[in-house]
Amino acid sequence: SGSAAGAPDAAADLPLPATDAYNITNSPSHKDIDLAIESRSMRVGGKEIKRYVYTDAARPETAALGAGLPIVVDAGDTVRLDVANGTGTATNIHWHGMSVPNEQDGPGLLIEPGTDHTYSFKAEAAGTYWYHSHERPVRDQVDEGMYAPFIVRDPADAEYDLDQILVLDDWVAGGNVGHMEVVGDVDTVNGRTGKDISPLALATGQIAKLRLINASSARTQVMRFPVGVRVTHTDGAPLPEPYTTRSLEIAPGERYDVELAMTDSTDKNLAITNERDAGLRIPITYTASGAKPAASPFTPPPTTSLAPGLNARNPDVEMTLSDDMAGMSGHRWTINGEVFPETGRFDLERGRTYRIRFRNDGMHRMGHPMHLHGAHFRVLDHDGTPEDREIWKDTIDIPYGQYVDVAVTFDKPGAWMVHCHILDHEDGGMMTTVDVR
Ligand code: C2O
Ligand code: CU
């Protein structure tokens, strides 16, 4: 989300953000991109929004994309991204959820205004990822639009009738309605709101893959589906046992891939909505064809068993999340009582599996979506209750007053960041590093 400026009259002259590029059905792979970061004005909900946008310099029309340039490649591709910073602020890029060598990860390097930097890495695992600035204050960069989807395709994805990215965000158009965090008052999908949202078109028997990404700075998006959808991936990781649901709570930074299959019995006024009426309604245009329901092209991976040592009660690493008013400028968001970079370092060995406990001991009735760079983790238990599904993630909400244990094995050395994905909390200190040797 970000802030709106300017009179509605000025906004009327602006085109609506383009959304075609988020339908990636049969899209070619673009693995060699001159990526530009620009400052732009866009029309959101009748207002002019000043924002940053990631664009493909070779395709100027991509500057109108409401949720940034989707990078779409195939698993195994070597990606080269030559990033030119056309803004007035120094920045860098983090490839959220992707397993890349530490020096390609983002934090630690700065792309000064008017300069460029080339990132290059192999897109190892298929999945729904995203990329965004990692330069603090991230609230001034990511919240203002320095983010976009990054999709690594599996060959089976080509069999879906529709492969659609849905980037969720909330923008501040009429005043900040949050408390300590930036929460916008206009919900958007792929940069559009209300009646400007592009419908999803499907016919009976067709099956769509929907890739939901929550790019909001602070808001958990609670999505409701008109029919049961089958969850196949969490944060890009395939589920050994997919499950069906009518709703999903998606915390900032999290992604879900779901399958939506149309059957003839479904009613005609279908839409995907969220829990508040702030413009987010994704209509589904449905054509009855009498066709048989399509089979899913998704092959779940085999289940894996936990390393026996992980059943030990005691965590190897404990991170207690809290907040206090001890800071010079007011609120501090802490890990083990300290703010970054005083939060200490955790030394871990490559190839070894650790139980990490995130405990939410904060003063406020809010969750902290904790994100780990460099590896996915497996969810072990919530407040002592074992997670019975095998779920791999890179971001997980730690509810108020509870703890969550996860298992993680790093296979790449380096210093990896761990932080809350509520941008004000990240900026306010709730961030640390694990040192993997
Ligand atoms: Cu998506 Cu370190 O962040
Ligand atoms: Cu937080």
Image (cartoon, helix red, strand yellow):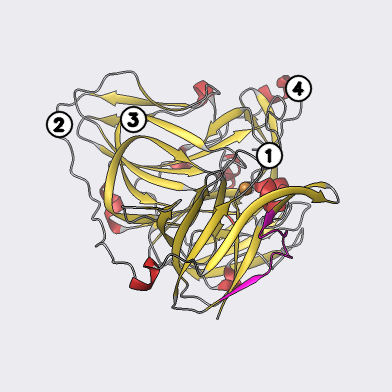
Query: Nearer the viewer's eye, disc 3 or disc 1?
Result: 1
Q: Position of residue 340 (x, y in %)?
A: 72, 61
**Near-viewer residue (305 or 222):** 305
Q: Quadrant of residue 144?
A: top right
- Could you classify mark 3 by the number of other residues whose Cα lies within 10 Å: few (under 14), some (14-19), or many (20 or more)? some
Q: Earlier in the sequence, mark 4 or mark 3?
A: 4
Q: Which residue is mark 4?
A: 7
The reply, left or right, for residue 21 in relation to residue 416 is left
- Could you classify mark 1 by the number of other residues whose Cα lies within 10 Å: few (under 14), some (14-19), or many (20 or more)? some
Work out whether 272 lies above or below 294.
above
Q: Amino acid at mark 2?
A: Ala
What separation in Å lies between label 1 and label 4 (alpha carbons)?
A: 26 Å
Secondary structure state at the residue bearing disc 4: loop
Give yes or no for contact between labels 1 and 4 (Cβ–Cβ under 8 Å): no
Residue under the image location 80 percent in, 51 percent down: 326
What separation in Å lies between label 3 and label 2 (alpha carbons)?
A: 15 Å
Q: Which segment did they paint magenta?
A: 334-347
Q: Earlier in the sequence, mark 1 or mark 2?
A: 1
Secondary structure state at the residue bearing disc 3: strand
**Near-viewer residue (133 or 49):** 133
Residue under the image location 61 percent in, 24 percent down: 45
Q: Position of residue 227 (x, y in %)?
A: 29, 29
Q: Amino acid at mark 1?
A: Glu
Q: Which mark is residue 181?
A: 1
Magenta residue check for 46: no
Q: Position of residue 346 (x, y in %)?
A: 60, 72
Q: Which residue is mark 3?
A: 201
